Amino acid sequence: MPDAAWDEDQDAAAMLHRLRGVAGVRKLRLFACACARARWSGLVLDACRASVEIAERYADGQATDAELEAAREEVFAELFGVDAGDSRANFIADRCAHHLVVEAVASALGAYSGDAAAMVREIFADPSMRLAALTRDEAVLAVARQIYEARDFARLPELADLLVAAGCTHAAALAHLRGPGPHFRGCWALDAVLGKGQGAPVFTETQWYTASRPFVMLHWWGYLREPLSPRKLRLLAVACCRLRWRDLARFGLEQAVETAEEFADDLVDLDALQRAHESAQRLRDSLAATLDSMTAEDAGGDELKNARQAGIVVASLTDPDPRSLDSARYASARDHDDAGQAELIREILGNPFKPARIAPSWLTWRNGAIVELARAIYQKHDFVLVPRLADQLRAAGCRDSELLEHLQQNRGHVRGCWALDAILGKQ
């Protein structure tokens, strides 16, 4: 039976959150496209309209990755320096063709000024409702295909009548087809008639363990689980900075990074973090001024640019305002391959498909020996002892293969390690 709360909910973001694990890439992209279609009159530039059309085709497997990317490039080129039409609609049209469908949905949701909850209900069926094939009548299916391809949604009530005549009794689907709309490609009831599904899963466990693009991984984590806590985000950025420790030490930034790491675990106060932040800011601003005074022929420009970038990252990392940590994601979310950072993300966040579960009996085994060892490892950075935790957990009755295998590794552990955090109760 349909859930009345679904029809009454006005929080579109919460509704989409509820659909995690259900909504696939096809439906999510068509949701973004529908938000753009709802503001179609504001899309006065050809490239913006083409972006939406290509994104719709891409959702249905009728356009390539290259075509999708080219559509975004065309929008950027046409919009650059131009103020034309509805800026919100233009923004959604641009994001419809984003290679990350989650980014497309988040942007569409943020820019759409209409009834976003109603749009979610247009594209996605009530998740508590079971949908089987509504008809096998070929004549009815032919009409449904015509409506879908021509976007002739004014004919949906006619389709509902044909379904009833063919023996369909699905009250919710019939009511939706007869409803006033507006309707768009992806309409859940029309999709149910045509047998169109959600599309591929947005992200799989296998992809998580083989991914090498930090930017993509963090986006999917935020979609599948939740935004990172300030502590986790700060420790992740710290760990990524440690991958380039020699550069930071050469620029005198290592102490600021260590201070940020200690602040994340409440080992230093806000004043200490502020001093580290000011130190990094001074270096950043000094190098920026030096670079501004240099010419292209001056030697050492690349070195100074690297130093300035390091200063920018560390200044964000040490900023007392947690909102600035998003800027620190430069150190942990670059939009290209970085195997080292990808491994650190898995080290600190764990598996988004399988949250860590720690049995209370493991924590009390031998008067808390496991917790005591974990705390000592964490406080002293003595990560070579981590495999001992796996041995103790196994002796305490733990059979969680993922937890044990992660702890059995004798390298790659840092503060923020998801397994250590789970044992110590850190978020």
Image: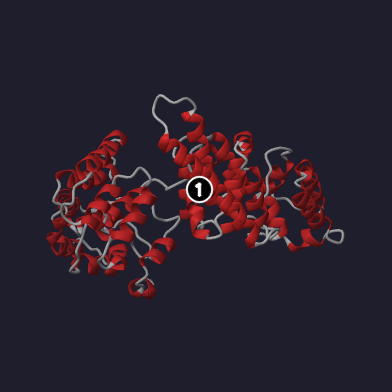
* Residue 249 picture location, percent across and down: 64, 37
Is 120 located above or below residue 398 in the figure? below
Mark 1 Cα shell of 10 Å, populated few (<14), some (14-19), many (≥20): many
Whether residue 76 is visible, yes or no, is: yes
Direction from residue 90 to residue 351 in the image, left or right: right
Quadrant in the rendering for residue 346:
top right
Q: Residue at x 46, y 30 (%)?
A: 301
Q: Residue furthest right?
A: 366
Q: Quadrant of residue 22?
A: bottom left
Residue 170 appears in the figure: no
Helix, strand or loop at mark 1: helix
Query: Foreground residue, 253 or 97?
Result: 253
How many numbered discs?
1
Q: Nearer the viewer, residue 323 or 183?
A: 323
From the image, which quarter does the N terminus lie in?
Answer: bottom left
| Residue highlighted by disc 1 | 329
x and y percentages locating residue 217 in the rendered image: 49, 45
Which residue shows up at 75% across the image and 46% down it?
381
Instruction: Name which residue lies at 72% across and 46% down.
Output: 404
Residue 354 spot, x, y in % from top left: 58, 52
Quarter the C terminus occupies: bottom right
Residue 116 pos. (x, y %): 30, 65
| Amino acid, disc 1 | Arg
The image's colouring method is: secondary structure
